[in-house]
Amino acid sequence: MNPNQPSRQEAISDEPWRIAFVVHGLDPGGIERFVTTLCNSLPRDQYAPSIICLAHSGKAAAWLRRDDVPVIELKKRRGNDPRLLVRLAQTLRRLKPTVVQSHNWGTLVETTIARRMAKVPTHVHAERGTVLGRLESHGWRMRARALVMRRCLDSSDAVVTNAHAVARRVESACEFAARRITVIPNGVPTPCQHLHAESRFRIRSQLGIRPNDLAIGTVGRLVPVKGFDVAIDAFRRVHKSYRQTHLIIVGDGPEKPALAQYLRGLGMAEHIHLVGHQADVSQWLAAMDIYINTSRSEGMSQAILEAMAAGLPMVVTDVGDNAILVGGSDSCGSIVPADDPSELAKHLIELVADAGKRHTFSENSRARHASSYTLDSMLVAYDRFYRRLIERTGHALSAART
């Protein structure tokens, strides 16, 4: 080798690696929080991210703190939009990314085809939840989707997920082996304790929650799979026994009007607070004393990790990786079956009644977050993941950058 010629690693590291994240849109949710977190946190001197929305941007765009991350809207029409592939390929040709990363079924096929059209060196697919779309899908349509998904995953350079449960779900859905999927858990930052105390006082005062009242809270997109109807039914049972309790629901989504109407009928406006989308979820977690997750299906819940970082004791449903996150030795809370408001209420009542148990779970939450689920640990893992992929396709990168 010529000593004056740079090594492959040096040759591909002379400028930031461009990564294009393809999402359906930027309405607030787990994928959107993950993508914006990576865009904000990957080192600027090594990575130049961009976000491509197949449809439209949304409120989650406000989570971007960097001013050099372009958000591109392709404005997909409802139903089939044959021109979408052309627009996506044109956008990829213009951006010239080293890596394009698709997310879930809704972007997989389009990215797989457009990546070939635009000759992007590396395609990563990230699967982060319900596999192949809606839970209720079945029959020949689902079988056809599974076949297409398997072929797309086979043609990608890597598949990554945040949860072992999702890897198993992919294997079950389309016979793509779970061992071929890289699992990188989510990570979230540690909240500032000073700001935590300020937020707690301000928000609880705003909602009329007195210092000695207990606030049970949950965060998520208001869609049926998140089970917020179960949270409300369980809380009604808790409130009958403990009147100085409140329920805070943080999030927005298509179910909001129906939930709001249901709550009006209950006559519990002073104790159940449907507060809508909040840009800084950590402030609202600071106002809570107990966190609940009532999902009917889950991968790895970002909100559970944020509650863990905030030191909240928890009651969560036994779906996805929830039991791995919360249960086991030195557990952070209780695990209950999905769709069971009675069992959820039972465990909540135990926590409300036992301050010592809440304290133990709280300390365990903080310790588990610090040991396994920090933002830094996730970033280190993704940096290593991208570097391995880029080094594998190093010969193609020089051409992509010229």
Image: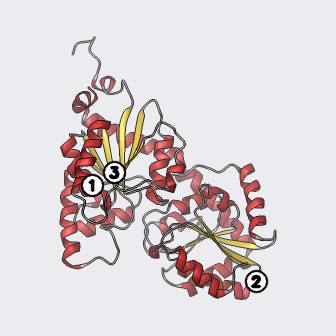
Can residue 157 be seen from the camera position used here?
A: no
Question: Is residue 138 shown above or below 111?
Answer: below
Q: Quadrant for the C terminus, please.
A: top left
| Viewer-nearest residue: 401 or 89 | 89
Question: Is residue 142 shown above or below 40?
Answer: below
Q: Is residue 196 left or right of residue 4?
A: right
Q: Amino acid at mark 3?
A: Leu
- Residue drawn at (22%, 30%), measured in percent from left and top? 395
Q: Amino acid at mark 2?
A: Arg
Q: Which residue is mark 2?
A: 243
Taking the view exactly as shown, the residue that stands out farthest to the top is: 4
In this view, the mark in front (1 or 2) = 2
Q: Which residue is mark 1?
A: 180
**Marks 3 and 1 close (CB-CB < 8 Å):** no
**Marks 1 and 2 close (CB-CB < 8 Å):** no
Q: Which residue is mark 3?
A: 74
Query: Residue 55: x percent and y percent?
Result: 36, 56
Mark 1, residues whose alpha carbon is within 10 Å: few (<14), some, or many (≥20)? some
Image-quadrant location for residue 131: bottom left
The colour style of the image is: secondary structure
Query: Residue 399: x percent and y percent?
Result: 22, 28
Q: Amino acid at mark 1?
A: Arg
Which mark is on residue 237? none
- Residue drawn at (47%, 59%), measured in percent from left and top? 27
Q: Quadrant for the N terminus, please.
A: top left
Taking the view exactly as shown, the residue that stands out farthest to the right is: 211
Question: Is residue 73 shown above or below 29?
Answer: above
- Residue drawn at (46%, 76%), measured in percent from left and top? 224
